[in-house]
């Protein structure tokens, strides 16, 4: 049994019922993305677990607002849409910044045109 397997076994034995999800499953998912060459501190594992539990509560509350007697996929999609939209906005960050810069440039141009127009009107 390798050192890592021993650690995972100890973590599985130390499951905390106060946490919303099984710790071992969360750690496994995190290690898949972070890499097995890095250690994940226990406070991070716990914080992620609690955060995911809170997120699930928020999504579940929103799904509970359905007008029907059962919760369906449409309710899930409605409840998770704000979080999916955040990801889309982050992807579009550069496009949004360019659009705002263009609007700023257009506004500056309009101000210059107004200034020139009123200079002519006032006879300067």
Image (spheres, rainbow, N blue to C red):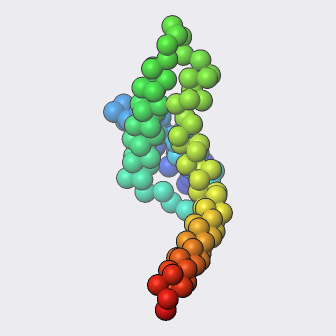
Residue 54 point in image, percent of width and height: 40, 37
Q: Which one is in front, 83 or 99?
A: 99
Vertical side of 111 occupied by 73: above or below = above
Using the rendered image of the protein, determine whether residue 115 is visible from the camera's viewpoint.
no
Q: Which one is in front, 110 or 92?
A: 110
Vertical side of 90 occupied by 56: above or below = above
Residue at 49% across / 89% down in the picture? 123
Residue 13 point in image, percent of width and height: 44, 37
Residue 5 point in image, percent of width and height: 57, 47
Using the rendered image of the protein, determine whether residue 117 is visible from the camera's viewpoint.
yes
Q: Which one is in front, 104 or 30?
A: 104
Residue 43 point in image, percent of width and height: 37, 52
Residue at 49% across / 23% down in the picture? 63
Q: Quadrant of residue 107?
A: bottom right
Q: Quadrant of residue 29?
A: top right
The residue sitting at the top extreme is 69
The residue sitting at the bottom extreme is 124
Q: Which one is in front, 42 or 51?
A: 51
Counting every numbered tag in the picture gives 0
Residue at 45% across / 27% down in the picture? 62
Is 118 left, or right, of 35 in this rendering? left
Residue at 39% across / 46% down in the picture? 46
Vertical side of 103 occupied by 72: above or below = above
């Amino acid at each position: 049994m390798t050192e890592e397997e021993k650690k995972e076994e100890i973590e599985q034995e130390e499951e905390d019922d106060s946490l919303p999800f099984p710790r071992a499953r969360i750690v496994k998912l995190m290690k898949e993305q972070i890499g097995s060459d890095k250690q994940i501190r226990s406070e991070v594992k716990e914080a992620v677990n609690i955060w995911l539990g809170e997120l699930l509560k928020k999504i579940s509350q929103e799904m509970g607002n359905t007008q029907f007697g059962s919760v369906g996929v449409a309710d899930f999609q409605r409840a998770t849409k704000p979080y999916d939209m955040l990801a889309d906005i982050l992807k579009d960050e550069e496009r949004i910044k360019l659009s705002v810069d263009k609007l700023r440039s257009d506004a500056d141009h309009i101000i210059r045109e107004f200034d020139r127009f009123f200079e002519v009107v006032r006879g300067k």
